[in-house]
Image (cartoon, rainbow, N blue to C red):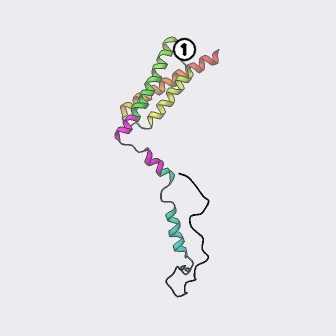
Amino acid sequence: MKVSGTSGVGSAKGPGKARPAGGDGFRLPEPAAPAGPAQVARASALGGVMSVDALLALQDVGGPTERRRRAVGRAGRILDILDEVKLGMLSGEVSHDDLERLSAAVRDQRQSVDDERLSGVLDEIEVRAAVELAKLERANSAS
């Protein structure tokens, strides 16, 4: 495309003829009476239809497959940490950080547990982690 001039789109014309006052031209509406308290309250109630918390909660809601996927992920994380703790205990070098991570993972999982047997297993894991942490702290304070 080649631009060959600086001429505008169209020529500007002067002001057009004024329309008669009684015609069907554009008119501004007459100012309405000031809004009463009922009208103001009604308008302000429309402002906050849905809060941010409600939107976040809607995003969090997943179907049964989504909840199961998350639960399996958390359980896998607990099993991985348990494996690290087991290897540490067998080698005699259990890590304080691994035990803390295990306790935190069990606390996170406990929020979504409805099964009594699974809750019992989580209780046992949490107690064992607390015992091992106490042993480590006692050994460190004796040194």
Q: Kindly identify which residue carries mark 1.
A: 93
Q: Specify the farthest residue to the left.
A: 64
| Nearest to the observer: residue 30 or residue 60 | 30
Q: Specify the farthest residue to the bottom.
A: 22
Task: Give the residue displayed 38% in from the left and 34% down from the top.
Answer: 69
Which of the 4 quarters of the picture holds residue 40? bottom right
Q: Residue 18, image x and y in percent?
A: 58, 83
| Nearest to the observer: residue 108 or residue 135 | 108
Inspect the magenta stretch and tell me whether residue 61 lies in it.
Answer: yes
Q: Residue 125, image x and y in percent?
A: 45, 25
The disc labelled 1 sits on which kind of residue?
Answer: Glu
Q: Residue 9, image x and y in percent?
A: 56, 64
Q: Residue 108, image x and y in percent?
A: 47, 34
Task: Give the residue displayed 57% in from the left and 82% down from the top.
Answer: 17
Magenta segment, principal secondary structure? Answer: helix
Relative to 104, residue 18 above or below: below
Task: Give the residue displayed 52% in from the left and 62% down from the top.
Answer: 47
Inspect the magenta stretch and tell me whether residue 22 lies in it.
Answer: no
Dot 1: what SS?
Answer: loop
Q: Label 1: how many residues lie within 10 Å, few (<14), some (14-19) or many (20+)? A: few
Give the side of residue 31 with respect to residue 79, left or right: right
Q: Specify the farthest residue to the front.
A: 4
Residue range in magenta is 55-69
